[in-house]
Amino acid sequence: FCKNGECQKVSCSLCKKECVPCNEDEDEEEYDEAVRLGMAAHFMCAEREAELGAFKKAWEEAIEFGIKQPCPKCGHCGVKDDACTHMTCDNCSTVWCYVCGLDCASEECSKGPDPTMAECYRHNVNWHANERRCPMYLTEINQVDNSWPDDDGAAKEKLLRFRILRNLKQTYDKMGTHAYARMVAAFPGMGAACGYTEDQINEVVMDVPLFQRNPDFLEEEEEEEDDD
Ligand SMILES: [Zn+2]
Ligand SMILES: [Zn+2]
Ligand SMILES: [Zn+2]
Ligand SMILES: [Zn+2]
């Protein structure tokens, strides 16, 4: 409502538009009807605002959960340090793999057969060829896929970006192109300003693996070692 008490102008706090012009000459009945219709139109502003707020939240979460990996057992979020891909949960002590996100003690986690090795190390055996195994260091991915950097910081950056883009693609597909455009119009910081453009998101193919494996890698490495 207008701060000027005599004016009685009603305006929407969301779109800042006045609902009905203040006209003292109108008879009261007509005025009430106009107010009623005007107010109803602005309830849609509130709904629209709530919907866009939900899109914004989903967008922020897609990015947040790309960065933080939750513990597969308790959901406590871990952030990877610069060391190996073995994660130990601060909360429940579960040992899990930062690359695939699986609990190393679980059935789903593929492991090499040597029972004298710790489970998390067995998960790293033959990762060059086995798509269900993961490397112990992100920098090793470069050995089989040269699109990956051999620098740890850059490799971690690449992994997070890969995850975030996939999360955003899912969120984008759920909300749709039109809603995305409305969200970015309402919250310009949510679009390409996040570092992920609409084109990059659209280019994401969900079943593309994190990196290309090379079944011949181990043999090649042995040959190199023989040379040394
Ligand atoms: Zn409004
Ligand atoms: Zn945990
Ligand atoms: Zn480790
Ligand atoms: Zn793994």
Image: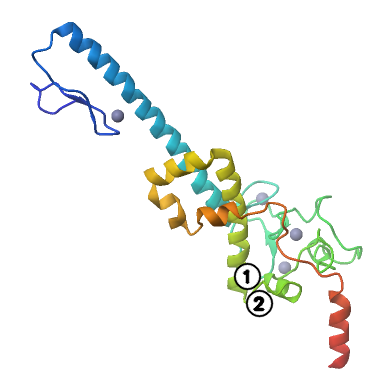
Quadrant the N terminus occupies: top left
- At mark 2, the secondary structure is loop
Mark 2 vs mark 1, CA separation in Å = 7 Å
The residue pinned by badge 2 equals 150
Residue positioned 72% across, 65% down in the render:
211
- The x and y percentages for residue 47 are 40, 28
Query: If you read the primary sequence from the N terminus, does the residue marked by circle 2 or circle 1 appear first?
Result: 2
Amino acid type at mark 2: Asp
Q: Specify whether tag 2 is near ligand 3 (CB below 8 Å).
A: no
- At mark 1, the secondary structure is helix
Residue found farthest to the bottom: 228
Closer to us: 137 or 191: 191
Residue positioned 45% across, 51% down in the render:
191
Residue positioned 75% across, 68% down in the render:
135
The residue pinned by badge 1 equals 155
- The x and y percentages for residue 223 are 88, 85
Dot 1 surroundings within 10 Å: few (below 14), some, or many (20 or more)? some
Amino acid type at mark 1: Ala
The answer to whether residue 2 shows anywhere in this view is: yes
Q: Do the CB atoms of the residues marked 2 and 1 lie less than 8 Å apart?
A: yes
Dot 2 surroundings within 10 Å: few (below 14), some, or many (20 or more)? some
